[in-house]
């Protein structure tokens, strides 16, 4: 979720960076209008609450002085103030819902250094790691290799769970497990990360916290407990370990000397998205379940870019 403080302070910059991602600049104006409305409602409510508190004290004083008629008049005034506060609170709830709904739909703002372009052809090559190998033969696709070496059984994976699911077999299963272990050990022992093993399902608040909801709600697997339909959607299979791990400290206050916090986690990832049929989605590409090792850092905002690098 974007920082509303930044948007208030730098609305024009927020518009430009949002437009660079193909979003409408007007969303920022809509958001700021809702923000101003909700803040005005809070101010008005606080003023009325102060009046009601003062009026309540007056009622006690008047009753002590035996001025019952004036006290009853004050009671009516206090009751009317309560009705106004309730009405404003209802209106604030509606404005808050509209504000949060719009804020949740806005994508993260790209770093100013990111080139703006209509498609991937505008991407700039910043750095190359290692050397691209040259072969004296025509390399096979991963699909052909998995079939020839019996690493993955695509047909039986589909038989078990439907299209988009894999069955790793033999050396394929062992290789996947070894890669997961290698990466976890690498990040823990050489890069100082703390390994965590999170739940593979989370509540909707966690999905909202990492920007998965509401944008990708239709691509999530919702959990239902047995035959109890009322439980459907209370929990979701995670699309990435980011969903639970990035929420570890949600709602907590961390002191500066506790930062950075560095976590790594393995998890299976579940995504209901289905790619269009074709070469780009064959084999292990765009499947509904895959394994991944995730890295998460909790850092001071001003140091985020350097930590990423």
Image: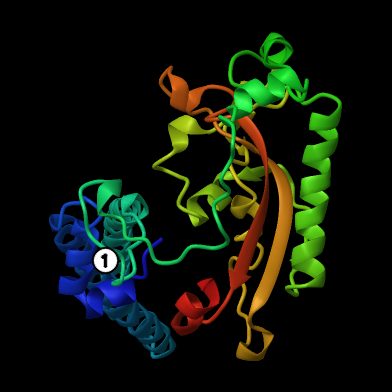
Where on the picture, by quarter, is residue 13?
bottom left
Q: Quadrant of the N terminus?
A: bottom left
Q: Is residue 135 visible?
A: yes
- Judge by depth and name the residue closer to the eye, 172 or 98: 172
Q: Position of residue 258 (x, y in %)?
A: 68, 85
Q: Position of residue 15 (x, y in %)?
A: 18, 65
State the scheme by which the image is colored: rainbow
Q: Which residue corresponds to the image point at 57% horizontal and 52% vertical from the top-left?
A: 206
Looking at the image, is 65 positioned above or below residue 114? below
Where on the picture, by quarter, is residue 194?
bottom right
Q: Which residue corresponds to the image point at 31% horizontal and 56% vertical from the top-left?
A: 123
Q: Is residue 68 visible?
A: no
Circle 1 SS class: helix
Question: Is 33 placed left or right of 87 in the picture?
Answer: left
Question: Is 131 placed left or right of 174 in the picture?
Answer: left
Looking at the image, is 279 positioned above or below residue 238? above
Where on the picture, by quarter, is residue 56?
bottom left
Q: Which residue is mark 1?
A: 38
Q: Which residue corresponds to the image point at 65% horizontal and 53% vertical from the top-left?
A: 244
- Judge by depth and name the residue closer to the eye, 247 or 71: 247
């Amino acid at each position: 979720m974007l920082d509303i403080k930044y948007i208030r302070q730098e609305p024009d910059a927020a518009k430009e960076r949002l437009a660079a991602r193909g979003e409408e600049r007007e969303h920022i104006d809509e958001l700021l209008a809702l923000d101003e409305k909700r803040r005005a409602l809070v101010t008005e409510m606080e003023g009325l609450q102060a009046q009601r508190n003062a009026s309540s004290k007056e009622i006690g004083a008047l009753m002590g002085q035996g001025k019952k008629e004036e006290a009853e008049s004050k009671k009516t005034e206090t009751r009317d103030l309560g009705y106004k506060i309730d009405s404003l609170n209802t209106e604030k709830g509606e404005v808050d819902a509209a504000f949060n709904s719009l804020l949740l739909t806005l994508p993260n703002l790209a770093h100013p250094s990111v080139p703006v372009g209509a498609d991937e052809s505008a991407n700039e090559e910043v750095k190359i790691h290692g050397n691209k190998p040259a072969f004296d033969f025509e390399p096979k696709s991963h699909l052909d290799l998995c079939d020839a070496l019996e690493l993955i059984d695509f047909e039986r994976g589909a038989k078990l769970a439907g299209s988009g699911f894999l069955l790793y077999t033999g050396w394929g299963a062992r290789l996947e497990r070894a890669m997961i272990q290698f990466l976890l050990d690498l990040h823990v022992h050489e890069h100082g990360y703390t390994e965590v093993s999170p739940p593979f399902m989370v509540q909707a608040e966690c999905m909202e916290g990492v920007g998965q909801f509401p944008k990708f709600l239709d691509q999530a697997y919702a959990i239902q407990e047995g035959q109890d339909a009322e439980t459907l959607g209370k929990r979701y299979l995670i699309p990435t370990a980011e969903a639970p791990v990035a929420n570890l400290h949600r709602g907590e206050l961390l002191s500066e000397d506790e930062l950075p916090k560095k976590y790594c986690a393995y998890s299976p990832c579940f995504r209901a998205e289905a790619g269009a049929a074709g070469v780009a989605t064959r084999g292990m590409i765009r499947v509904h379940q895959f394994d991944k090792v995730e890295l998460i850092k909790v850092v001071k905002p001003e140091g985020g870019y350097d930590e990423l690098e």
